[in-house]
Amino acid sequence: MARKIVAGNWKMNKTVNEGVQLVEELKNELEKVDTSDVTVVVSPPYVNLSEAVKTAEGSSVQVSAQNVHQEESGAYTGEISAQMLKSVGVGYVIIGHSERREYFGENAVDIAKKVDAVIAQGLTPIYCCGEVKEERESGRQNEIVGGQIESELFHLSPENFENVVIAYEPVWAIGTGLTASPEQAQDMHAFIRGFISEKYGQAIASGTSILYGGSCKPSNAAEIFGKADVDGGLIGGASLKAEDFVGIITAFN
């Protein structure tokens, strides 16, 4: 049985003080509800990570980075390694987000190496995949997403693959106000799970958390999370307000 996970991606938002305040508010809100069967993750910018970890200590909130460099160390000005992230106390790292692919030119080789680097440090990659609008409209979404997963994840051993969380993000629905219908989300998640099963077997496929990552809000989360193969969400804008984020987290209840 896959873990239920709701992860908030803050993107390039919140100063350190604002981030501390948001984690405090989130902790307070979560104390009022039962989230024992849901893993809650927040993903602040790099400069916020240390304070976010300290603020979340003693609560159910886990902390993730939004990106990582694939090398352990060296002359890579401006970059952060998985070892550095581990030393701060984060447990998760988002890898392959569509914005990293589009704006920073990350390719399959880069992403596969980042997955390896994160797993080598005992951290959990939240691996992102998804199709753009033109690929969806031409009916190629399964081909595109399957190709991403095959080239970026299927080099992993079964033991290492079990550490991966997958986030399906229909790129055409990110920040656009468009949302994949619950049926579209379920169809893709079922395809992904079946694709994993073909490679690694049913047991590993059933245990892989597959999150939905396209404009999920408190108003539509319950319907999306109610689908059989949707194990949670990677949340963008709605994770920047504690009340909205908790509204999504409790959509499982």
Image (spheres, rainbow, N blue to C red):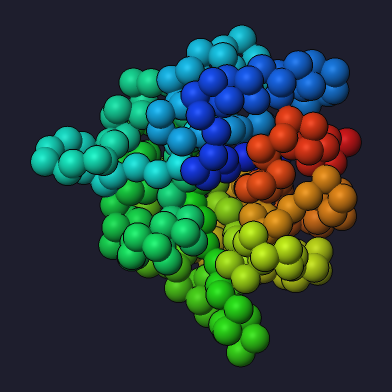
**Which residue occupies 38% across, 21% down?**
88
On screen, residue 206 versus residue 49, left or right, reads right
Q: Nearer the viewer, residue 133 or 153?
A: 133
Residue 91 vertical position relative to residue 21 in the rendered view, above or below = below
Q: Quadrant of residue 27?
A: top right
* Vertical arrangement, residue 81 with respect to residue 61, above or below: below
In the displayed structure, 19 sits above or below 68; it is above
Q: Residue at x 17, y 35 (%)?
A: 73
Residue occupying image coordinates x 40% and y 63%: 103
Labels in figure, total = 0
Where, quadrant-wise, is the N terminus in this rendering? top right
The residue lying toward the viewer, choosing from 183 and 56, is 56
Q: Let me know if residue 54 appears in the view.
A: yes
Q: Is residue 154 left or right of residue 14?
A: left
Name the spot of residue 147 as percent of width and height, x first.
45, 73
The structure residue drawn at horizontal position 36% and vertical position 26%, both measured from the top left corner, is: 86
Of residue 172 and residue 199, the one placed in the foreground of this image is 172
- Closest to the observer, 126 or 69: 69
Looking at this view, name the residue that lies furthest to the bottom: 138
| Residue 123 position in % (x across, y down) | 42, 33
Which image quadrant: the C terminus?
top right
Q: What is the x, y in percent for residue 157?
A: 37, 50
